[in-house]
Image: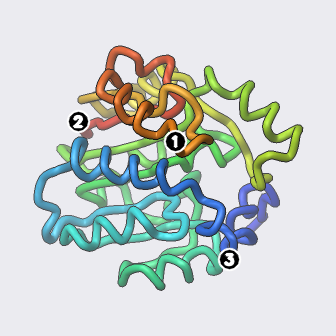
Amino acid sequence: MLKDKDDKMFFYDRFADDFDSVMNMYDTDRRLDVIFRELIPEDLQGKLLLDGGSGTGWFSREASVRGAAVVSLDVGENILSKVAAKCDSHKVVGSVLDIPFKSGHFDYVISTEVIEHTPDPKRAVMELSRVVKSGGTLVITVPNRVWHPAIAIANVLKLRPYEGYENWVGWPQLKAWVEASGCSVISMKGIHLFPFVVPQLNPVLRWFDRYGQSLGPLMLNICLKASKK
C-alpha cells in the first residue's frame, strides 16, 4: 500500500463501491469515444499501455479489448477490484504523482479525469510523461479550469457526491506542462460546451463537440494527445 496516505486522494478508493452507480455514463462514453476512436484509433495489439488513475476500469477494459497489454494504476485495492471485474489487466496500487515504473516503459499512457484529483496536477503530468517511451503516445483528459466556479457552487450545495481534490487545469496551462515534460502536443480539443446534467440536451452537446478544437478553451473538458520526443 501507499505510504503517507492523503485522505482526499484516497476518497475514490473509499467511494469505489458507489462510483459506477453515480457516474455520468454520457460523459464516460463520450471520453471513451474520443480517446479510442479519435485520438488513438490505431491497432493496439501487443502495445504496453498504462491507464494512469484507472478508476473502476472503463478505459482499461476498452484498451484490453483493443489488444493492448494494460497496466491499471490507482491508489487502492478497493477501486482496483472494480477494474478486475471488467478486464484482466495488470493491477498496480500506486499514485500518478510517483509512478512505480522506469522511465520510458510504456508505448501508450492514458489518464482521463485523474490529474485534477491530486494535490499537484503538474507533477502528475510530468510523471505520466516520464514513463512514455520515446515516440510513444500520451493522452490526458481533464476538466477545464474556466468551469471550476460552477462546480464549486455545486459542491457547496451538495449536488455532487465527491470529496476529493478538484484542482482543475486550464487549456494553455495543460499544453505548457505537457510540452515542458518533453512531449510534442499533437492535438487538443474540448468536449461538452456546458455541463451534462440534462440528458435531453446530450444531442446538443454532441453536436457542439464537432467544434471542439475552436471552442475547446471554453468547453468543460480538455482532451490532449502528445508524442514523447
Neighbor class of circle 2 (other Cα within 10 Å; few <14, some 14-19, many 20+) is some
Q: Cα distance, mark 1 to mark 3?
A: 28 Å
Position in image of residue 70 (x %, y %):
32, 71
Q: Residue at x 44, y 70 (%)?
A: 72
- Kindly state the secondary structure of the residue where label 3 is placed: helix
Label disc, if present, on residue 200 of the rendered structure: 1
Q: Name the residue type under label 2.
A: Lys
Q: Earlier in the sequence, mark 2 or mark 3?
A: 3
- Ranked by sequence position, the earlier of labels 1 and 2 is 1
Viewer-side residue, 113 vs 129: 113
Sort mark 3 into few (<14), some (14-19) or many (20+) by Cα contacts within 10 Å. some
Name which residue type carries label 1.
Gln
Figure check: 210 above or below 72: above
Q: Which label's residue is closer to the chain start, 1 or 3?
A: 3
Q: Which residue is disc 2 drawn over?
A: 229
Q: Is residue 134 visible?
A: yes
Q: Secondary structure at mark 2?
A: loop
- In the image, 177 versus 191, the foreground residue is 191
Residue indicated by mark 3: 17
